Image (spheres, grey):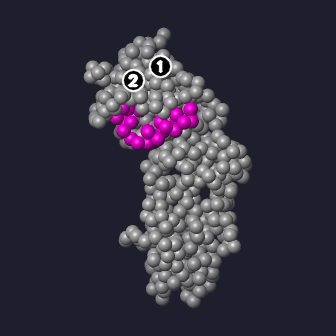
């Protein structure tokens, strides 16, 4: 049965991720999106982490990996005990994820503005090989400040990367704001755009499942904090 | 007299490379696009010009490599290595994927363009990142061999083309090769890449041996130890930032009393002049006269 909220066991797993207090709000703001992706959208499985036709989820906002770790543990990518000593010497899970250490993590991230260009290259590479797997990259609204994203947004639009979806988790953490809205910046470059409330899992699922046959898609997912401010 | 430059040869080799290696794709940021129109027409999806966007160029290369494509990435050295350095570090190295980065411009090929188009520190910067092989070919034939070999692997490879080249190609096996031998007690001068012919000219009346490499990183330290002997007197002539090879040479000779000098582009100050590459070589002491004078100080 599809869920309409993040199930309590996943929240319990999230609470086991300790030592990441500094980034707590940003980690939790991504939870709804990551849960819905892994539970209801992506064609992925723990026994297919290297399969060339798997869908790819790229966590660009690498400073908030707790929710991704919790969801991957919930879905069986690694033992839940890994969540208990995040960022310790012997831990494979750090405050920023490393793809070479964690099954299911597609990119090492942490420095902002790298996920979207990597996602564009991944989508181009899959298309070159005739593969139709989806590439979904999660960025934050403040992360969009990094100019590398502007480069990638333009390139994805011009190359009509229809299997690429960018999810912008908008918790209004951007200091200078985005006059005219975030989606408009993608729309101008030819992307299909959707705005949803992140806690509305049905709307989120529908938005994330939708792809356009001729252009990339962006889903701007507003968090509760952002809803309250609006 | 118009043999192709290394850069022209690079463009010419892309067609055969893409024909032979189906995994390869070329990623450009406008620079070079007009020189690869033919191959682009033949392989439109595998020659990817993303506009003047160097950060995305390297990020896209990383993404391509994550799917198993072998990216060949090319632009001017300052834009490839310096502008996109964090992308080179993270989108390739940290992701544990490879690419072939091929730069143009070397240290001062773009003498008339000024500092913006010059990157004498590129070899230093690339050598500072884990897992990279840095080639500085001295001849277009060497470049072609390096490019095709790199295209068949998944390694991280940086190839630095230069407007200057030697009269003849040498082996590109990554090892030091003796170009002018002599008694093993004679000082050893190591020439890297396109500076070799100038070094040979500069040392004509000096009682030294000359060895050549087109792969300064990782340096053939075993070959260096063998050639340098128990009490090494060595000079490294490197046509980029002076002292770039110092860590590798110091490590190789750490267990023996040695005297080593480095001759390259000085670190101290920007050269705020235009003119020709020859003018710049002379100003930096990297023409035959300048190298001769420096080596005489070192080897007596």
The structure residue drawn at horizontal position 28% and vertical position 35%, both measured from the top left corner, is: A175
| Residue behind mark 1 | A207
Earlier in the chain: of badge 1 and badge 2, it is: 1
Q: Main secondary structure of the magenta part?
A: helix
Up/down of A162 relative to B20, above or below: above
Outermost residue toward the top in this view? A1
Q: Decide if residue B192 is in sight here.
A: yes
Residues packed near mark 1 inside 10 Å, few (<14), some (14 to 19) or many (20 plus): many
The structure residue drawn at horizontal position 38% and vertical position 20%, both measured from the top left corner, is: A198
Up/down of B112 relative to A182, above or below: below
The structure residue drawn at horizontal position 40% and vertical position 70%, both measured from the top left corner, is: B272
Report x, y in % for residue B282: 49, 78
In front here: A80 or A130?
A: A130
Asked whether residue B89 is drawn in magenta, I would say: no
Pointers 1 and 2 within a single chain: yes
Report x, y in % for residue B41: 69, 45
Q: Which residues are magenta?
A: A136-160
Judged from the image, the secondary structure of the residue bearing numbered disc 2 is strand
Judged from the image, the secondary structure of the residue bearing numbered disc 1 is helix
| Residue behind mark 2 | A221
């Amino acid at each position: 049965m599809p869920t309409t909220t993040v199930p309590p066991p996943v929240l319990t797993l999230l609470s086991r991720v300790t030592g990441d207090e500094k980034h707590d709000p940003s980690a939790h703001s991504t939870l709804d999106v990551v849960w819905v992706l892994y539970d209801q959208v992506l064609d992925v499985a723990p026994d297919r982490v290297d399969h060339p036709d798997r869908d790819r989820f790229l966590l660009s906002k690498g400073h908030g990996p707790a929710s991704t770790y919790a969801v991957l543990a919930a879905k069986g990518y690694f033992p839940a005990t890994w969540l208990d000593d995040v960022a310790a010497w012997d831990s494979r899970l750090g405050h920023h994820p490393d793809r070479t250490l964690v099954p299911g993590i597609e990119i090492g991230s942490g420095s902002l503005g790298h996920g979207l260009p990597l996602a564009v290259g991944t989508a181009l590479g899959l298309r070159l090989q005739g593969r139709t797997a989806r590439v979904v990259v999660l960025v934050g609204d403040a992360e969009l400040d990094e100019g590398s994203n502007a480069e990638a947004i333009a390139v994805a639009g011009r190359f009509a990367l229809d299997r690429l979806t960018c999810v912008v988790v908008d918790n209004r953490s951007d200091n200078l704001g985005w006059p005219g809205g975030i989606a408009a910046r993608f729309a101008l470059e030819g992307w299909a755009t959707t705005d949803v409330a992140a806690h509305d899992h049905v709307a989120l699922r529908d938005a994330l499942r939708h792809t356009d046959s001729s252009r990339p898609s962006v889903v701007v997912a507003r968090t509760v904090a952002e809803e309250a401010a609006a | 007299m118009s043999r192709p430059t290394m850069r022209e040869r690079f463009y010419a080799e892309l067609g055969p490379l893409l024909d032979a290696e189906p995994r390869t794709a070329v990623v450009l940021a406008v620079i070079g696009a007009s020189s690869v129109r033919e191959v682009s027409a033949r392989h439109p999806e595998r020659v990817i010009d993303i506009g003047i966007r160097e950060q995305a160029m390297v990020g896209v290369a990383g993404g391509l490599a994550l799917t198993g494509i072998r990216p060949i990435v090319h632009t001017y050295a300052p834009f490839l290595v310096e502008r996109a350095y964090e992308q080179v570090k993270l989108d390739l190295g940290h992701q544990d994927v490879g690419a072939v980065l091929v730069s143009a411009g070397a240290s001062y090929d773009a003498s008339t363009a000024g500092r913006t188009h010059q990157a004498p520190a590129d070899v230093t910067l690339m050598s500072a990142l884990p897992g990279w092989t840095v080639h500085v070919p001295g001849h277009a034939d060497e470049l072609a061999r390096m490019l095709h070999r790199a295209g068949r692997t998944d390694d991280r490879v940086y190839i630095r083309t230069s407007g200057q080249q030697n009269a003849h190609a040498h082996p590109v096996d990554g090892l030091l090769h003796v170009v002018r031998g002599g008694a093993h007690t004679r000082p050893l001068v190591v020439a890297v890449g396109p500076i070799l012919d100038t070094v040979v000219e500069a040392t004509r009346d000096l009682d030294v041996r000359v060895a050549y490499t087109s792969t300064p990183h990782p340096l053939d330290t075993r070959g260096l130890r063998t050639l340098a002997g128990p009490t090494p007197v060595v000079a490294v002539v490197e046509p980029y930032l002076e002292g770039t090879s110092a860590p590798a040479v110091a490590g190789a000779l750490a267990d023996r009393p040695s005297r080593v000098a480095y001759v390259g582009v000085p670190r101290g100050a920007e050269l705020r002049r235009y003119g020709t590459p020859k003018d710049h070589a002379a100003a930096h002491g990297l023409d035959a006269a300048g190298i001769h004078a420096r080596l005489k100080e070192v080897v007596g």
